[in-house]
Amino acid sequence: MFTVKIEGDEIQVPERTTYEQLVEPYQGKDGRLITVISSDGKIRELFKRVNKPCEIKFFTLKDDVGYKTYVRTATMLFMKAVFDVYGCKAAAQCRMEYAIGHGYYLSAEGAFPCGEESAKKLKARMQELISRKIPFMKRTCPIDEAMEVFERQGMDDKVKLFRFRRTSSVNVYECDGYYDYFYGYMMPNTSYVKWFDLIPYEKGFMLLLPSKSTLDHVEEFDERRKLFETLQKSDEWGRQVGIETVGDLNERICSDALSDVILVQEAMQERKIAEIARDIVSRGDVKFVMIAGPSSSGKTSLSHRISIQLRTLGKTPHPIAMDNYFVNREDTPRDENGDYDFECLGAMDIEKFNSDMLKLLSGEAVEMPTFNFKIGKREYHGDVMQLGEEDILVIEGIHGLNPKMSYALPDESKYKIYVSALTSINVDAHNRIATTDGRLLRRMVRDARTRGSDAKRTIQMWNNVRKGEENNIFPFQEEADAMFNSTLIYELAVLKQYAEPLLFQVPKNTPEYYEAKRLLKFLDYFLNVSSENLPNNSICREFVGGSCFKV
């Protein structure tokens, strides 16, 4: 018998008891679904067994670790259904692409006919598998054996990925004869996927899952067409250069052929920026270029590069940081925890911003403010601005796409740009790289370099940052006149050398350790790429240093 602590209780547990049996009395309490647990600081899947006295902590759909486990399990359930309905080759050809709201796009182009009928068949098979409570079995295999398994299933992307693994073994999941590899944890059996929907979409399907806020149901699909098309274009470019997965990237690094890829992608980004600048000028009446995007999306570098392109077209751009229109610290709204909520619209002096912008639009001279973050007050230092005929303001800020922020300005005077780091490669076909992971690593590296913040602090703040993005940026992204993907296909291999030392410093006994350990495992997939070959105007330079811009 072992003594186990759970939520303040001490209970006696027989040897060989699974964590699933242990947490069963707590499942459903307060509406929660426990997906994985931590035992004395180490994350454990529920099908594992208790082997010593320990203290248990639950992870549910409200927690990042728990939610990702749910998504991963639902993805394998979908792939198993494809395997059963359309065969092994079809499952190998399916690809988990990207998240659109609370939907996950799974492409099946060339694998089998897509459409309403296929969606019905696959959904019915998934529901049947759920009702049978089929276990997900995890086995640690020698890497050569795992490569043989996936080679037989036609999953060449996984075989290529494993060629670059430093470990001698990998974890393989099996569900009723179907084998797959997943980066992360899995729930015990198919019945845990309690809420999902599957609808046909484009050349595949949208797997709809509950959000962290809804938990016990699936909302209708919120289509974000512009975002989807931007992601598709990035994928198309990856296919053109033959880099769709981390294995492809590692092969290119080993062949010493990445320098051309760097030059070509940097040139492609510059071409896209030039196209946006030409579109701005072609509209004639634009005086305000509003740039918004989530944290670490490269807004500052983009504003500089667009300004340069506008100059080549005869315009005189002036950068303005929307942050200079923060209300004074004592007037900042507080969140539910009593902390200042700098992300909300109420933290901005909307009236003053619109008043100043209207005066500039009418040709008046305006003394522009500067916000002093040290003392939390707006200041004036005689910085007077007056717009001429060819002048354009390039305004960067979190609320740039929100119509309430610029309510007084004529629509024809505004051009809105949404920028984000939209990941364009996968770990392998069934393991997508979350956009948030790339941005978190960017921010971690930049914060350590420019603010002296450690990785623990960056991870600690990340949930609040994400909450602000969900409330203040993502709802307005489809309002943009242009979308710009700032991700570089090779950048995670560049960020790795800067991020790993920071992540290794996160103490084991802290809540942030779980995320640090996950990110270290993730970065282990990549080979290193030196930043030496990056141009000094590269968006990646905003984070690793060496930019020619003041960022």
Image: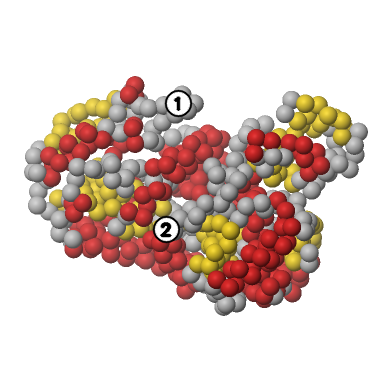
The one nearer the camera, 353 or 250, is 353
In the image, what residue type sits under mark 2? Arg
Mark 1 Cα shell of 10 Å, populated few (<14), some (14-19), many (≥20): few
Residue 417, position in %: x, y? 31, 54
Name which quarter of the figure residue 40 lies in.
Answer: top right
Q: Are marks 2 and 1 in contact (CB under 8 Å)?
A: no
Q: What x and y, as percent, mark residue 413?
A: 18, 51
Horizontal and vertical percent position of residue 72: 64, 55
Is disc 1 placed on a helix, strand or loop?
loop
Residue closest to the eye, 448 or 4: 4
Q: Identify the residue at image location x=54%, y=42%.
A: 213
Q: Secondary structure at mark 2?
A: loop
Q: Which mark is residue 224?
A: 2
Among the two numbered marks 2 and 1 on one chain, the one whose residue lies closer to the N terminus:
2
The answer to whether 482 is drawn above or below residue 367 in the figure is below
Question: Could one spot residue 395 in this view of the protein?
Answer: yes
Quarter residue 75 falls in: bottom right
Q: Amino acid at mark 1?
A: Asp
The residue labelled by disc 1 is: 339
Vertical arrangement, residue 141 with respect to residue 216, above or below: below
| Residue 171 appearing in the image | no
User: Residues under labels 2 and 1: Cα distance?
Assistant: 32 Å
> Image height check: is 207 above or below 348?
below
Q: Residue at (27%, 55%) from the top-left corner?
A: 306
Which of the 4 image quarters holds residue 139?
bottom right
Q: Nearer the viewer, mark 2 or mark 1?
A: 2
Q: Residue at x 54, y 59 (%)?
A: 104
115 relative to 276, above or below: below
- The quadrant of the image that shows the C terminus is top left
Indicate which disc residue 460 carries.
none
- Identify the coloring: secondary structure
